[in-house]
Image: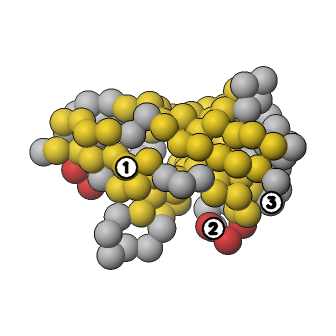
Amino acid sequence: QVNLVESGGGVVQAGGSLRLSCAASGRTFSDRAVGWFRQSPGKERQFVARVSWAGVHTFYADSVKGRFTISRDNAKSTAYLQMNSLKADDTAIYYCAVATGILGTAVASDYNYWGQGTQVTVSS
């Protein structure tokens, strides 16, 4: 069992930055991939980024590539999402999730533990 708590969301102007954190508690974190997803009203949950169990491999959605950076600190059981050059289209609730495997995928159903989400609002 893993409990995930996201933090760091808020309201920021377009072009600004935010850093999201995902603190994990429980037995399973360091041996699984972690992903970030987001969901806007009326839209399906969308993959944002993922990082492999050791933090070596990362993958990003095209919409955030070059602007967002995912990382993790297994000693602290925490994952991060650094978001720069934010756009109004980035406005959403952001969720972190722990995958069922060590590399993760872009598919939400391949993640079996989810946080409650943190709201990110980018004003234009």
Q: Nearer the viewer, mark 1 or mark 3?
A: 1
Q: Nearer the viewer, residue 107 or 20?
A: 20
The residue sitting at 19% across, 38% down in the picture is 14
Measure how far apart labels 1 and 2 are at the Cα level: 21 Å
Please give left or right for residue 103 compared with residue 27 in the image: left
Residue under label 3: 100
Instruction: Give the image quarter of residue 1.
Output: bottom right
The amino acid marked with disc number 1 is Gln
Q: Which mark is residue 107?
A: 2
Contact? badges 1 and 3 (CB < 8 Å): no
The residue sitting at 73% across, 32% down in the picture is 77
The amino acid marked with disc number 2 is Val
Please give left or right for residue 122 compared with residue 82 in the image: left
Residue under label 1: 119
Measure how far apart labels 1 and 3 are at the Cα level: 25 Å
**Considering only vertical position in the picture, is 97 above or below 39?**
above
Contact? badges 2 and 3 (CB < 8 Å): no
For marks 1 and 2, the one nearer the N-term is 2
> How many neighbours does mark 1 have within 10 angstroms: few (below 14), some (14-19), or many (20 or more)?
some
Q: Nearer the viewer, residue 124 or 27?
A: 27
Please give left or right for residue 99 compared with residue 95 in the image: right
The amino acid marked with disc number 3 is Thr
Q: Position of residue 4 (x, y in %)?
A: 65, 46
Q: Position of residue 38 (x, y in %)?
A: 45, 57
Residue 28 appearing in the image = yes
